Each structure stands twice: as structure tokens, then as C-alpha cells.
Image (cartoon, helix red, strand yellow):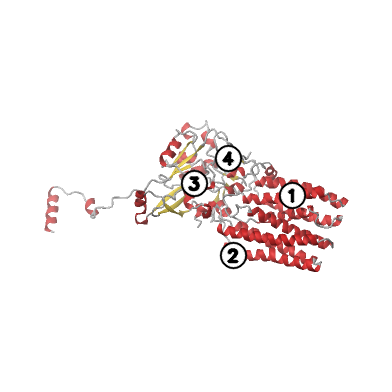
Amino acid sequence: MHPASSIIVFTTLSGMGFGLIAMLGLGAAPSDGTAGLVACALAFILTGIGLASSTFHLGHPERAWRALTQWRSSWLSREGVLAVVTLGLFAIYAALWVFAADRVAIVGILLTLLSLVTVYATAMIYGSLKTVPRWRTGLTPLCYLLFAGAGGALLAATVSSLMGSGAQSSLYAALILMVIAWAAKFVWWSRADRTTLASIGSSPETATGLGSIGKVRLLEAPHSSPNYLMKEMVYRVGRKHVQKLRLLAVVLGGAVPVLALLVAAVSGGGAGLLVIAVLSHLIGMMAERWLFFAEAEHAVSLYYGHR
Amino acid sequence: MTSLPTHTDKSLGLVIDLDICVGCHACVVNCKEWNTGGYGAPLSDQNPYGADPVGSWLNRIHTFEVEATDGSGCSSSEAQILSNGKDARVVHFPKSCLHCDDAPCVTVCPTGASYKRSEDGIVLVNEDWCIGCGLCAWSCPYGAREMDAAEGVMKKCTLCVDRIYNENIPEEDREPACVRTCPANARHFGDFSDPNSDVSVMVAERGGMDLMPEQGTKPVNKYLPPRPKSRPVQSAPSDLVALAEPEAKGFLGWLDSALEKMG
């Protein structure tokens, strides 16, 4: 699949943003108004840039509001509705926190749940597609959720550390979630490497129905230059760099943040180190998300000589 | 509304005969010609006369080579005919929207632009609602949908909804443009919900098949498999040149046979 930068930015930034909201809902970060301003602004900026970015690849962004109507059947629509509801409630929560230094615990818990369900819906946009076998597993939303939690906790720890207090619980949450998230991602990769179109029973033979005669091979493509389908779904550029990119994703997205978190936990400070960890994690997550799309093979490739 | 109808009154679609299609692309061209001026926005091309032309088309013909493999699901006689000398056969393969009963492109649509009609089962895009997110194309295993780069909306086969009910055109033209134009009669249009319709009978008699049934889309369009390949008589005459020569009569005939006898 074509790894559109708008979708990579959308899934990584909104994932981290909603992860941060989930952590703040649980009571992370100091409760004074200044810390609230910084933490809530950060969450709004991340989710805002992410959601805005998701509209950049649309043919008609001015009609994006229509995407809120089909929540009965469409995960994309559900994601939109949940994001709007979550951010609306978060605006109230943030206003009370910043201006009255009052964090309403019950609203916080509700926000945590809503944030997680939003991230789940984002993942299910991809996880529900039968045409991309490596995406279609419960491990896909699991990884999205764990990465959102890890990123959110890392951000919460960083904000707390910058504000000079109360970072310990966020630090430990970030450490644990980061390790579990990457463990889940390794399981996801291991499954993905085994899960091909062939393994779910799709082949050029079933795609053409000609399997009863013999082995099917594309002799002549229907068009002489690549079309929308090939650019969007038969994307193969960069697959040769998969191993290097996976290493880059794990080191920047996992190892560096874990080390920084450990140092910060032991030394009891290290706000600067945590800021570096956040940036490193973000770059690593973008590599992970790039691979998520670029490596994915789509059923339509069977009509275009995929083998 | 992107929930699928539980029942469609009719089930309109195409039968495509892979035994007959000669791969002339006439259906591709006539589809483009009709649909660039018909339902919805024109089917645009980008850089049509340049080095890398690209454009949206609703019907494409792939050409596949099928190499017979011994005993791979063939009946013994069929396998013998087809796999003799490991010969390959060429199959031209037209592909357009299959108007699936369980169409994933409809349910993933976030706006309600993509829908399946309950009256005749045609899957359409309301281009005034489409936001051009492309998720429907991702959900389709057949590559039946192409984004129009000029208009920013998703294009797909409409089963020529603006022809089949069109009372302003002669009755014989009220079928999809691809069917109407096919010079080999490889494409047929009809109602699959009627077991006595021409298309239903053809599918029953020829073993009409679904593409990628494992994807669970329940396509309406059916493909008729190529018939077993016939081969020329194995013991062909060795002296073909003699067969081609005109028969000599009269004096020339006597001369011919006399010279033959002399060796």
C-alpha cells in the first residue's frame, strides 16, 4: 500500500495525542493550572495536527463533515465521531483544569475510555480490511493502543518532568507500556511475515477463476503506464530496506526512549533527556507506520503480476 | 446510507465469457466514451499525450497466460488435452465492478456516498457526497474503483444506469455500453435474480464462477470459464505442399503421372 505521508502523520500524531489524553484522564501530570495548560495544549496540538493531516489526502476536504454520518457501518466514520466527541469533552476537562485547577476525576476516566476507543477505531479502519491480510488481526488495534499508551505516558512523564514534579508514575507507566508495545509489535511482525495473500487462499488463480486450467501468469497488463490502483495498492518501493527500517523503528521508537526513561527514573530528573526521547520515539513511530503501509500487500496486486 | 440492503428486487449484472473474449478493448473504449459524458463527472485523463499518461477507466482488460498443470483440478481428459506438451493458453480477462451482494466498498464508506440500490442491486457512488478518501478502493479486492484525479471523487462502473432505463434511446441500446459494443458477444447483461433469465441460464449451463470467492464479497457478475482447448488432428498429412497443388487434368494430368512413374 502507498504510505501517504498525510496518513502516517495522522496515525502517529493523533495516536500520541489521544494516548496523552488517556494518561491525563488517569491523573497524570501535576494538577496546577500551568501544567494543565502545557499538557492540554500539547494534546490538542498533536490530535489537531493529526486530524487535520488526515483531511489533506481527501479529494474534497470541504465535505469532511459528511464522514461523521455513517458510524453504523464504517470504522472511518466511527473514528471521526469518537475523535470529535473525545476532543469536545476534553475541551471542558481542560478548561476546568487550567482555569479552576479542578480535575474532575469521573470526566477524566470517561476521557481515558473515549481516547482508547478512538485509537481502537483508527486501527480498525485498517484492521477490518480483508483485502490486506497482514492488517486483518486483533493484533493491529492492540499495537495501535499500546503505542498510543506508551507515547502518551512518555509525553505525560516529559511534561511532568519539565514542570518539575510528579513524574514517577508516568515514567513507570511509559517504561512498561513501551516494552509491552514493542513486544506486541514483534508478534505482529512475525505474524505479518507469515500472513500473505496466498496464506488466506487468494492467488492469481482464484482472482481470475482460471485455476482449474492451470497456473496463471500476467501476460499483458491492461494499460501501459501505472494507474491509480497500481500507485495506491501495488506499491513496492523500498521493501528492500525493510530490515534496516525495522531496526531504525525499534531503536529510535523503543530502545532510545526506554534508556532515557530508565535514566530519568534512576536520576529523578532528566527533562531534557525525555524531550529527546519523545522526538526519537516520534521518528521511530513514523518509520514503524511507514512500514505498516509500505510492506502491506493488497489483493488487487494479484491482477498485476504480483508474485 | 452505507448499510447494505438486506434484499434487492432485481440483481442486475454481467456475464463475461472468457471463452469468447478476444481482448480487442472495444468495451474498454466504449465504456470510457459513454461514461465520460454520462453519469457523474467526466472520466479525466492526466497528461494523455505525454510520456506517462494516466486516467480513470471503469473497465480494463488484463491478458493472462495459463499454463496447464498436470492434474490440477482438471478432469482426466481435459488435463490430457490441455497439458499435452505443457502448452499455455492465453485468456483475455475484462474486469469491471462486480456489483457484489456483500460489497465491502459500501460499508466502509464514511459519508454514505457509496451505496447499493435495493431495487436492482447496482452499486453506485453519489459524487456530490464523496470526499475522495479512497477507503472504498482499498476495501475492493478486484480493483474496480479508481479515483478521478481531476474531480477528486471515486469513479466506478454504474452498469450504465443512465442507459439501461433510458427511454430516450432505442430499446436495443438499453444495455451497458460494454455489452452493446462487444463485437464478439462475450458480454451479456441481465437479471440474476430471475432463474430463467438468459444470464442465469448461461451461468447454470457453463459453470459460471465468482472471482475470489474466499474474499466473501458475493459478486453478482459471473465469469464463464474457457472451454477445453481443442487441438488439431495429431496425425497431420506429412506432405502439405501436395495438398495445396491444383489437381492436373487432361494432357497435363497424363504428363504428371508419367513423370511421377519415372521417379
**Percent of width and height locating residue A294:** 60, 58
Q: Quadrant of the N terminus of chain A?
A: bottom right
SS at mark 3 in the image: loop
Q: Looking at the picture, which amino acid does disc 2 mark? A: His
**Percent of width and height locating residue A70:** 66, 42
Residue occupied by mark 1? A113
Q: Looking at the picture, which amino acid does disc 4 mark? A: Leu
Q: Do the residues labelled 1 and 2 touch (CB within 8 Å)?
A: no
Marks 3 and 4 sit apart, C-alpha to C-alpha, by 20 Å
Residue occupied by mark 2? A241
Q: Looking at the picture, which amino acid does disc 3 mark? A: Leu
Please, which chain is the residue tagged with disc 3 on? B
Label 3 or label 4, whichever comes before in sequence order: 4
Q: Are marks 3 and 1 on the same chain?
A: no
Name the residue nearer the viewer: A54 or A109. A109
Marks 4 and 1 sit apart, C-alpha to C-alpha, by 37 Å
Q: Do labels 1 and 2 share a chain?
A: yes
Tell us which disc is closer to us: 3 or 1. 1
Residue occupied by mark 3? B211
Marks 4 and 2 sit apart, C-alpha to C-alpha, by 40 Å
Marks 3 and 2 sit apart, C-alpha to C-alpha, by 34 Å
SS at mark 4 in the image: strand
Q: Looking at the picture, which amino acid does disc 1 mark? A: Leu
Q: Label for residue B124?
A: 4
Image label count = 4
Name the residue nearer the viewer: B69 or A4. B69
